[in-house]
Image (cartoon, rainbow, N blue to C red):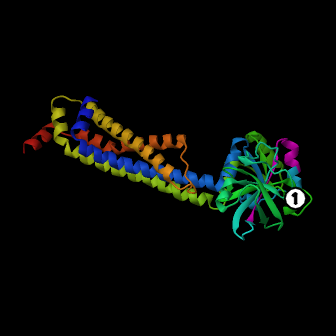
Amino acid sequence: MFLAIRELLYSKLRYIMVALIIFLLSFLVLFVSGLAQGLAYDNASSIINMDETAEHFVMDDEAGMQLTRSLIDDEDQEIVQNNIDQAEILGIHQGTIQDDETSQADIAKFYLNDDSALFPEVTEGEKPSGQREILADESLQEEGFRVGDEFLEDTTEEIFTITGFTNNQKYSHTPVIYVTGEDWLEMSGGDELLASALVLPDIGEETASTLNSQLTDAEVVTIQDSLSGIPGYSEEQGSLWMMIVFLFIISAFVLAAFFYVITIQKLTQFGILKAIGTKVSELANTILVQVGIISVVSVTMGIGVTFLVAALLPSDMPFMLPFHLVASLAGIFIVVAILGSLLSLYKVKKIDALEAIGGMEA
């Protein structure tokens, strides 16, 4: 430890350069991860938030996990409701709304019983209490909509009024509006509430399997699995997480090259230390301590700068970096840095003390 810290202080510029590389790589990994998480939440926050109180969806088995294509028939609805008391009807349909100034906005229309625990909390205004009233995601405020504003709904071609706003309720990157049962019936054009899906609590794998065997044209899936059916969700997440994986691989190679070059530059010193009786394990410990100190300091700075940059981003730019993800990525990055130093440890083990000292004299 003493030798490791003493060398870090003696060769400040050399190790500051290494620390700068680790800082930049860790910042890039954290920032891209924040964008991936932010895009995922912006694409599916209305579904992800249900995961707190529900566990499964019953969906049309031919819908390809797409809620907007799913429709549960009366027979399957009856089977589910006979087995699960807490099954909630979820209706989803995408469309547009238009205000008095002929400006249009893409939206997703959701139906949920407003007494359900799944119904979102009102952050401004109040819940819709009658026909032609809706609760909207607050991102619609960026389009100029306010509580009390009216708009033309495209399916019924009727005028609706915004009675309140909620937050973090988006689907396929569009704000969600929650309509009442009467309006959902009119939009469906029938006498019964049409269900895009039935939302179930945590019923366990055995009950889910039993229910699956009874359904005729539907299947039970987890809410997390259903996210893959949201348009663009899998493609966005696949591309961004592929970038993150490659960043980790590139980081391992870059750090291995840096530490190896530093070790080559110190072959003579390592040879002298081995000649006077220093054990290989002590030299390896010195390198690992140096890598650990540099990595922890650099990654900590990377985390701080990432949150600073995130605070300066425009409000409409999706970015989310939860603490557990930061801790996981920081841990992986430090492990990658240590793995990058293994080549140096192997080189130190193979140093011949006499040859190294002779090289110094030459």
The residue beneath circle 1 is 185
Q: Nearer the viewer, residue 9 or 206?
A: 9
Residue shown at 75%/56% (left/top)? 177
Left or right of residue 114: residue 224:
left
Residue 128, image x and y in percent? 81, 51
Q: Dot 1: what SS?
A: helix
Residue 211, image x and y in percent? 81, 46
Q: Is residue 95 magenta?
A: yes
Q: Is residue 65 magenta?
A: no
Left or right of residue 123: residue 86:
right
Residue shown at 24%/41% (left/top)? 12
Residue shown at 15%/32% (left/top)? 275
Structural crowding at the residue carrying mark 1, measured as other residues with C-alpha within 10 Å and reported as few (<14), some (14–19) or many (≥20): some
The amino acid type found where label 1 is placed reads Leu
Residue 210, image x and y in percent? 80, 44
Q: Quadrant of residue 153?
A: bottom right
295 over 235 or under it: above or below: above
Residue shown at 66%/56% (left/top)? 139
Residue 259, image x and y in percent? 29, 45
Q: Nearer the viewer, residue 135 or 7?
A: 135
Quarter of the rendering occupied by the C terminus: top left
357 over 126 or under it: above or below: above
Left or right of residue 340: residue 224:
right
Q: Could you tell me if residue 225 is visible in this image?
A: no
Q: Which stretch appears magenta?
A: 78-96
Q: Nearer the viewer, residue 94 or 210?
A: 94
